[in-house]
Amino acid sequence: MDVIRVSKTIDAPLRYVYDWCTDFREDDPQITGSKSQRKVLEKTKKRVICVQIYQGADGNQKVALNIVSLKPPIRGILITLERRMMRRRLSSQESGQEQDQT
């Protein structure tokens, strides 16, 4: 099984970015000019299941089943992690350590 993780900073409200990034639609491949086809089988708040039909490098038609788990952002967790990292940095500076301990 292939697991793909994507990270990108987008300057927009968190909820807007999450909704935009997880709005799986059947016409998404056309946005990038792809000739592949997508059929969305299930779309809930927790996951998206879709079938992708595309031409492989060998010229044969391929079918991929994509199961995407959706985990909405929780701002409180992000803030907590940032505070922990900041406390570690401050502790390191006060004790004279030069390296960041995060």
Image: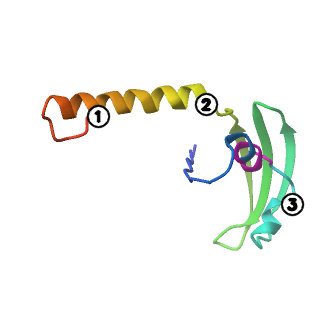
Q: Which residue is mark 2?
A: 75
Q: Position of residue 68 (x, y in %)?
A: 70, 40
Of marks 2 and 3, the one in the foreground: 2
Residue type beneath disc 3: Asp
Q: Nearer the viewer, residue 40 or 64?
A: 40
On the rendered structure, is 90 left or right of 82? Answer: left
Q: Which residue is mark 1?
A: 89
Q: Which residue is identified by label 3?
A: 27
Could you tell me which residue is drawn at 76 percent across and 64 percent down? 54
Number of residues whose C-alpha sits closer than 10 Å to that of mark 1, classed few (under 14), some (14–19) or many (20 or more): some
Q: Which of the two discs, 1 and 2, labels the residue nearer the N terminus?
A: 2
Residue 84, horizontal then vertical, whole percent: 39, 27
Left-right relation of 75 to 93 = right
The residue depicted at 14 percent of the width and 28 percent of the height is: 95
Give the Cα distance between marks 2 and 3. Answer: 31 Å
Q: Are marks 1 and 2 in contact (CB under 8 Å)?
A: no
Expressed as whole percent of the image width and height from the top left, the position of residue 85 reads 37, 32
**Magenta stretch containing residue 73, yes or no?**
no
Residue 70 position in % (x across, y down): 70, 35
**Distance CA(mark 1)–CA(mark 2):** 21 Å
Amino acid type, residue under disc 1 in the picture = Arg
Q: Which residues are magenta?
A: 17-23
Q: Nearer the viewer, residue 2 or 71?
A: 71
Q: Look at label 2 and name its amino acid.
A: Arg
Q: For the stretch drawn in magenta, what is the main secondary structure?
A: helix
